[in-house]
Amino acid sequence: MSISRKIAYNVVFSSTAKILSTATALVGIGLITRHLGQDGFGLYATALAFLPLFGAVGDWGLPQTTAMRIAKPNVNEKKIVANMIGLRIFISIAILILTPIAIPLLPYPYELKIAILIVASSYILSSLYQILIGMFQKRLMMDRVTGAELVGKIIQVGLIFLGVYYKWSFFLIVGTLFVNMLVNFLLIFFLSRKFIYFKPAFDFKYWKNILKQSLPLGLATALTFVYFRSSTILLSVLRPPEDVGIFGAAQKVIENISFFPAMIVGLTMPLFSHYISKDKNKFRYLVKENYKIFFVLVVPLLIGGILLADKIIYLIAGPEFVKSIPVLQINMLSLSLIFFGTLFMNIMIAAKLERSIFWALLVCAVVNVSGNLFFIPRFPDNAFLVPAVVSVITEILVVGLTGYFIWKKLKFFPRLEKFFQIILAGFLMGITIYFLKDLNFFLLVLIGIIVYGIGLLVLKIISKEEMAALFSKKETELK
């Protein structure tokens, strides 16, 4: 099977699985918001905001380093994975020990502190299976990972449904996250054994070499958390749980969709790393195709998300969260920018420009935290809107700075063809949705997809050559 066809298959399968997983997760959010209310959901959103915080502290860039190391030819994959797992176990245990010491210092109620401990336990399982994903990326078999994650999400939401029906406590609802991560880890662990049989290794000299390589990526991950994920925690410290709940309802929608750019880039990241030094033309072609795919996806997502924000919030969270509508509309702008920021950062990782990533993200993190700390107290009546606006400004900076470094360091920037045709297709979709806005939400989404799809075909936004490449049976492997 050709590389293009493998990517196409993985994108289709993984997209379908992720869409189903996202839909399932949103059902879970809808159940939780109605079960806990604004204040309770505010506490829930705050607790879950610590999962990426633990990830930022314990990540150290290890998943990306794993993917890059095992993508190289003639490497000892077993040794790499075994040591990565051993290092992850060591870091996770350290976090689990330090968390109970740090939690009493937080200005939170007792129930929220216990929930954060549950999240910390969930992080350990998440951190272990994230390391294993590199093996699936290398083989262009991310369909296995997304399938396993879908199973875990279905089980979690099934438990949430039981929890709502039997009126479980706040702690048990948070505990469903641990079950989800446990299922994900077990499935991905056993699937990975089909490639290589390994056990954790504790080669401290090798760990030192790993950490030296991955440290810049780890710092970048920490800074990414600060500018993208810390808003909920800052809001929870400065404002009551109600405001966190209003912001969190819209933010959870974005978080459950933002997987998409990372998933697509994750499929092509090993190819970026390989071709950037072997074949510059092939590398630029892959970047260009990713850039085009992202733009084709972003246009309908942005237009549809803004026009249908009220229906999305009513459907997911209920009328009690009506104040979340403008938050979601603003967040759709951030989501659109995340696509391109994700692509540009992965290009820089492939080009070994980690130091430039660090400085770009440091600026973004400072702007984000400063903006939230300064403006949240000054707009108490609409404090939940502040993190959304600050997020848009931050994502503009991310795209601008990473794009600048790509142009400066690589003397290359992806050029988008048929820009106006894509915009026109999105405009036609938006007009259709606007005039039919009284229809059922799902019917509107279906109509929007059909209209946009027809626009893509009629305006010839995707060429015959690109379609032929996706379905070509010609064998094209990495060399």
Image (spheres, rainbow, N blue to C red):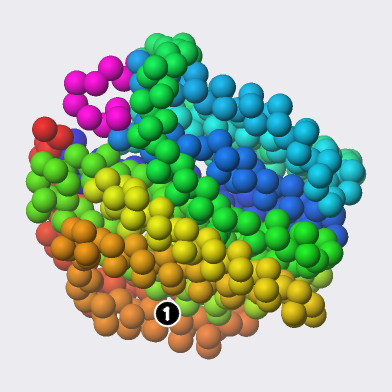
Q: Quadrant of the C terminus?
A: top left
Residue located beneath label 1 in the image: 429
Can you tell which quarter of the image residue 270 is in?
top left
Q: Residue at x 15, y 35 (%)?
A: 478
Q: Element at badge 1?
A: helix
Residues 254 and 241: in front is: 241
Q: Is residue 455 magenta?
A: no
Any part of residue 475 in sight: yes
Q: Vertical placement of 89 versus 397: above or below?
A: above
**Residue at image x 76%, y 39%?**
102
Is residue 82 in view?
A: no
Residue 76 falls inside the magenta stretch: yes
- Residue 120's spot in the image, x, y percent? 69, 35
Q: Position of residue 298 (x, y in %)?
A: 40, 68
Q: Position of residue 12 (x, y in %)?
A: 36, 48
Instruction: Please name the amino acid that badge 1 sits on.
Output: Met
Question: Local crowd at mark 1 within 10 Å, few (<14), some, or many (≥20)?
Answer: many
- Residue nearest the observer in this picture, 169 or 367: 367
Q: Quadrant of the N terminus?
A: top left
Query: Does residue 292 sit above or below 182 in this rendering?
Result: below
| Camera-side residue of 223 and 416 | 223
Please provide percent x and percent y for residue 119: 71, 38
Give the vertical position of 283 relative to 234 (above or below).
above
Residue 226 found in image quarter: bottom right
